[in-house]
Amino acid sequence: MMRDDAPVADIPRTIPDKTRLLLYVRAGGRCEFDGCNEYLIEHHVTLNALNVGQVAHIVAFKIRGPRGDDPERPADINDPDNLMLLCHRCHTEIDNPETGAKFTRAILEGFKRDHEKVIFHLTDRKTQKRTTILELRSKIGGQVTSLPPAQVWDAVSPRYPDREWFVIDLSTFDDDSPEYYQLASHEIEARVQRLYDQRRPDTALDISVFGLAAMPLLMFLGSRLSNKGPVHLYQKHRGDTQDWTWKADGPPVEYGFTRRQIGTEREQVALVLSLSARLDLDRLPAAIDATYTVYELAVGSEEPSPLFLRRREDLATFQSAYHSAHAAILRDHGSVDAIDIFPAVPAPIAIACGFELFPKVSPVLRVWDHDRRQGGWVHALDIGIPR
């Protein structure tokens, strides 16, 4: 008669190598305890190759072990479906006599099933899609905001960031200097050129852009990015999740384009972007006088707000509306040399405004920035190539 603390008869305790290999592959080399995900084939500090994983039984090898008295014990106690790959701490937790009782067979099988489903999904790809992270970093309100790596990984999924990020750091520039925009735009231009120069000649860069800077500099950055490879723009969501991942829910954003003032000179045109805030046309600089025709591109179905841009599709809709606005201006005013632009927009829309320009075809953008320290709008820089 078998004792109640005996293992299943005729099955050795040693896990076969093939079974162990299968388990590691299914688990992706990571701890399968829900919420842990520790990488188990390198040391967490030195990063040296090291196998620290432990193979744990869901239904214990011995009948008196954790969950070992399950009425439907597996015929093969070492079957891969009854094994989990765990780190030492999680293995101790599920087998601890004081705490292990709450980790039932059903719960652990759920941990294993969910973890292995994610690993299969992430690895079920024909090719690995990589993207270069381009971060524009500057002082906002006197402070420099860091970009958390975990948020970047989540935002660009299912693509994979290159190991090295490409950072354009403007945080050391004096943003009170009269030469700030000129110096900062020169730094952006030089750094973006270096980014493209270092790529392989036979490949087009896939670039994911995360930018926090003044509107004119974000527009300038966009104008220097090439459309010969994919460019993905991301938004910092400040209202709820405080991350950079585009949302999947929410009503679509509509945009409206209107003519707010008819000027006396056909070639004098201004475009106001009232998206993050409603801009008061009466407070535009004195240079935008009665000779100017003033247009406004605004959110059409809600009040302007810094939180309105949630979905990637709403950015694409803006890009379409922006093109339509430029087309309408050129239709009504002919071949104007420049458009004075006043932006109150989220960062990715500012970048898109520069990115969507056509060199030597689109009018130059004469970009203004609202600077409270100087009491209103100031001309920051010009973007584009005169036709």
Image: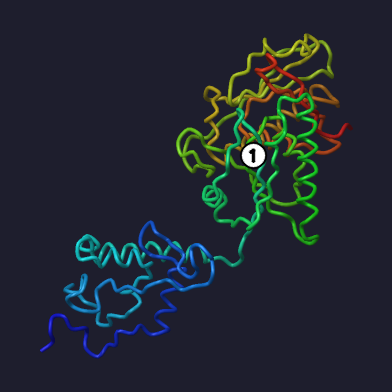
**6 vs 308: above or below:** below
Point out residue 31 in the picture as x, y percentages from the top left corner.
40, 65
Figure quadrant of the N terminus: bottom left
**76 vs 133: above or below:** below
Q: Residue at x 64, y 55 (%)?
A: 131
Q: Residue at x 73, y 17 (%)?
A: 294
Give the secondary structure at mark 1: strand
Quadrant housing residue 380:
top right
Badge 1 amino acid: Gly
Quadrant housing residue 9:
bottom left
Viewer-nearest residue: 348 or 138: 138
Point out residue 109 in the picture as x, y percentages from the top left corner.
30, 66
Q: Residue at x 27, y 62 (%)?
A: 107
CA neighbours of label 1 inside 10 A, class few (<14), some (14 to 19), many (20+): many
Q: Residue at x 79, y 41 (%)?
A: 189
Viewer-nearest residue: 367 or 144: 144
Q: Which residue is mark 1?
A: 211
